[in-house]
Image (cartoon, helix red, strand yellow):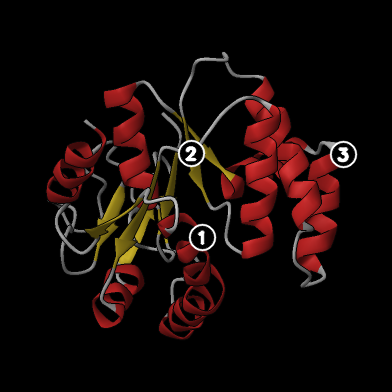
Amino acid sequence: MNIILLGPPGAGKGTQAGLLEDKFGLVQLSTGDILRAAVKEGSEVGKMAQDIMSSGKLFPDELMAQILGEHIDQLDADVGIIFDGFPRTQNQAALLDDLLSERGKVLDHVIELSVDEDALVDRITGRYTCGNCNTGYHDRHKLPKVEGVCDVCSKSEFKRRPDDNEETVRTRMAEYRGKTAPILPIYEELKIVSRVDGMGGISEVSDALNAILS
């Protein structure tokens, strides 16, 4: 079972992908995670990605598809994949189709996590994590039991992503609507698109996804 999980940043794709991995034995391939890992490792791809991103340019679609293909080839042939972060454009959708067909694979589901923009801004701008163990918190929805102390590791080092601000979130939403949403008609013609309310609780969203995939 191969799935594309769509939705703007902050819609909960990463969280839900992790739950789907556990339940269905799938493997999540997140282009963001792949590139960040490559940069951290200092590999040739990582150095290239660092140079491209630090110059403000977009990572080339063809190169990203090549890297994704290499990761697919490292998996067992019968393992299902959750694609997170790719495709984001019509060109990327075409590249992914080529990647899968070359390997005798097909897409089974394309699921969009639908969101309310104002609620998403609140969700993202309020989130922060423990700098030591990466446990997530939120200014309004999930505060530590003891103020300033992580529930899990008892450290007092918290951090926020610098791009978790309203202006950036709304810019990303506009970009998602302009570039990614238009790929949905491609998959709607194949009758493999489903939509889930991404603003529900984690368990609610998970139940809805499970119902689609079971």
Q: Nearer the viewer's eye, disc 2 or disc 3? A: 2
Q: Quadrant of the C terminus?
A: top left
In the drawing, does residue 156 fall left or right of residue 212?
right
Q: Residue at x 70, y 49 (%)?
A: 95
The circle on residue 44 is: 3
- Mark 1 burial class by Cα count in 10 Å: few <14, some 14-19, many 20+: some
Q: Where is residue 41, by image quadrant?
A: top right
Residue 138 coordinates in the image, percent (x, y): 25, 62
Residue type highlighted by circle 2: Leu
Question: Decide: marks 1, 2 in contact (CB < 8 A)?
Answer: no
**Above or below — where is 9 with respect to 36?**
below
Residue 177 visible in the snapshot: yes
Q: Where is residue 195, by image quadrant?
A: bottom left
Dot 2 or dot 3: first in sequence order is 3
Residue 122 coordinates in the image, percent (x, y): 27, 76
Q: Residue at x 66, y 53 (%)?
A: 94
Dot 3 or dot 1: first in sequence order is 3
Q: Residue furthest front?
A: 189
Residue 81 coordinates in the image, percent (x, y): 48, 31
Residue 36 visible in the snapshot: no
Q: Secondary structure at mark 3?
A: helix
Q: Residue at x 16, y 39 (%)?
A: 211
Residue 98 coordinates in the image, percent (x, y): 69, 41
Q: CA distance from mark 1 to mark 2?
A: 12 Å
Residue type highlighted by circle 3: Glu
Q: Secondary structure at mark 2?
A: loop
Q: Residue at x 51, y 42 (%)?
A: 83
Q: Which residue is mark 2?
A: 107
In the drawing, does residue 8 fall left or right of residue 29?
left
Q: Which residue is mark 1?
A: 186
Q: Nearer the viewer's eye, disc 3 or disc 1? A: 1
Q: CA distance from mark 2 to mark 3?
A: 30 Å
